[in-house]
Image: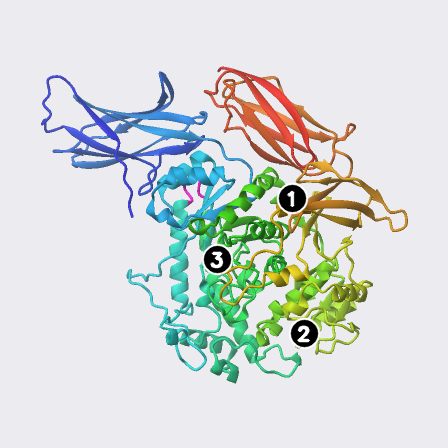
Amino acid sequence: MRWFIAGCLMMLVMPGYAAERESFVQWSTALGPEGFPRTTFTRGESIPVRMTLQGKTGLPAGRVRLAVVSADTTWANVSVKVHATTAMVASVLAEIPVPALRRDSYQLTLEGTFPDQTLATSWTIRVASPPLPDSLAIGMWWENAYRKQQTEVRVSEYRDRGFNVMQVMAVYPALLDECLWQGIRCVSITHGQARGADGKTLETGNRLMADGRVYGADQQRPRWSLANTNWQDAMAASIGRTVGSLALHPAYWPMVSTSDDYFMWTGLDYHPENVRRFTEQTGREVPRPPEALAEPFPVAIHREPGVIADDDPWVCWLRFLCRDVLGRYNRRITDVVLQATHGRGAAMPLCGGGRENVMGFLPYVDVLTGQWPPYNFGAHGFNVLCCYNYNFYRYPALSQVWWYELGRMGNRDLPQWLMPETMDPRALTHIQNLYLYLAALQRGLMYFIYERTTPGAFEAFERVLPVLNRHGPLLVSLEAADCPTAILMPFEQACFNTDFPVDTQYAYANLRMAHRDVEPATPEELATSRYRTVLLAGIDWLTASSFQALGQFQSRGGIVCVDRDTRVQIPGAVRLDLSLGTGNRNAGYGNRDQIRSIRNAVDPHVPGWAQADDPHWFLRHCRLDGVDYLWVVNLMTREQDAAVIPESGQERRDPHPLPVGAGWMHDVQTARLDVAVGPSMVFDVFKGKPLLSRTDPDSGRLRVDATTGIWQGTLLAFYPSKPDRLVVQASDHARAGRSLTLKCQVSDGKKTVEAPFTLQVNVTNPDGTRNLDYTGQWLMHRGAVRIIIPFAINDLPGPYQFEFEVPDCGLTAVQSVVLKGR
């Protein structure tokens, strides 16, 4: 679609010449790139001005002058020569730079001078605030953006509710301009169109079951296939073209979501193209086991337990579908997005997983839909980890961490985003999930969906987002501390038992509730020095290479522990006389006796950096700039979890009441913590207050109590010394059009506290209004930050009040700066 905005045209005809003169010139003007008009810009940009000139018998020579003005002041101007031509229509492209102006509206004037004739038109343009450093991305999908209505109202509502990103499928110029003006970023859900060189749509065919039938045909919903590599390449190229055009606008953040619900079209697919390519690569026919012939999603494939060949046909077939079909498509999209954005962009899927329905209850690791993180991300796919997950307590709340831990397997250096839901009516559910998302170190949360957001969800956002936004730069920067223990997740195990990742979440939950530091890992990751212990929970099959990886791990001094449900024999392994987890929710979650037994069994081999006096706390050790942090999140008890288990198929339609009283927002839970850290000053980051702590003389571990609301959480920081004062160094005067340097430092009274801190700077103009250009947040690394304030050439003269706050530890400071005119 092409957008066109015409300027307000005013023709001034010089005396003595008739309007119908043969050389009479007409013009039309537009701002912004071709097909993408703009009226809002930032400092340092150049405004493209496109002019179409028309004359009856050709065009005379002339000149066009462009100027950015306000009141009686001209802030910038350029002049463009128009050459005479016999053509009756000519296009002229000019550019005028946006000067360093404050956030405000201005006039862009155009004056064309030709023999005996002057043309004039003007535009109202807006100059927006300069961009600020990154923070935790929190946004929501606005589905009705395609209607292009209420743009200003909706963007304002997002900003006022605490969102800093808007996600849309239909991106249009006025929306990007409004996002830029109001200081939030816009990200897109982008799908392409697969067309061949002749412009015709490429057909990819249907997804086929092992017996040749079309998947979904019996339900009148045949599914299409991703098998055609020409289709994949054309679709990716189309996405790249779209993203490349959008990325020209500074409000567009090229974090591109795509492949929405693709788990319904990918995975186990006997399309002829998949069959041909697999046979070409491996030299063998595709396997069609009886279970695959009997049903489209064979959860279990019979095979005797033990060590199997690396070239097992079923494992090779599913690996091909995950890596060489879906992974190939993902990688193509990533490559074109990077190319279209000069390396700035990123691509990620909006995909769930599972056989139940489109709610996607099994994200990241549903092998039968082609999903296994090492084969879908990084070198084999997207460069941002992402899924959607609308749990509704289909699984315990702690699964909100488990799925995202699985997503990191094989790609621990990639950022991770998430699309949660806003449809659950229970406010506390959203609050609970949000703290678990943060403890899972999500870098971005794009909620689904504005049009179906419940009052309960909005209540949750109102309670929590102000807290999170105060600490956004810190939260988006925290990194997982090294985890010494892995729960082994072999791809081959998931091939023969698709529910293996679902069942293993209970082992993870038990170990985490026993306050052991564990994470899922693939056999390939054992080659690193990351782990000291590997746990096998219910493993029936290992390929020869996975078996060898365990042996090599042991030869380097690593410890392998296997539970009694593991049927593969591992020489030299420590045998645990218990199950690490039971794949049954009623029996498998929150069993205190089982958790206690597991803690005692693994205690010699599996350490815990932090422990609590009660298992109903999720503890996550993080680090940044050499400083330790601890997420502390209150968990449901076994009885509370059982009370919210939904009826299958009724997860969203008829949710159970939460087993909490009406005063849940005032309930306080206290965790008595024991932490393996040296003498430290412990702060509750969200409260900005120190906590009393002491070092146990016998164990040398630090003891501290932390309090949160029920099913809520907080973040503790372990600083090397007590933050006592915020020191700001800056000149007390500045000049318009020049930069002011602010040096900020957190001190313990003697020296800088070498720790990261969030710094909030609020700026007030001389007339008492809030300054949006320079108000913002920064992350202080090692207790210090240097901030450059680029005063505009037309900033109001007079005293500016700078108010500084470090919300992580409650420190404040004030600095007044008198600005002089140019």
Distance from Cα at disc 1 to Cα at disc 3: 36 Å
Amino acid at the residue labelled 3 = Leu
Labelled pair 2, 1 in contact (Cβ < 8 Å) = no
Say which element carries label 3.
Answer: loop
Amino acid at the residue labelled 1 = His
Say which element carries label 1.
Answer: helix
Residue 539 tag number: 2
Residue drawn at the location 15% of the way across and 19% of the way down = 14
Q: Earlier in the sequence, mark 3 or mark 2?
A: 3
* Residue 37, image x, y percentages: 33, 38
Badge 2 local density, few (<14 within 10 Å), some, or many (20+)?
Answer: many
Q: Nearer the viewer, residue 520 or 138?
A: 138
Distance from Cα at disc 2 to Cα at disc 1: 44 Å
Residue drawn at the location 66% of the way across and 63% of the way down = 520
Residue 666 tag number: 1
Query: Residue 307: which quarter of the image?
Result: bottom right
Residue on which the image places disc 3: 350
Amino acid at the residue labelled 2 = Ile
Query: Residue 714: which quarter of the image?
Result: top right
In-image side of 384 versus 620 (left or right): left
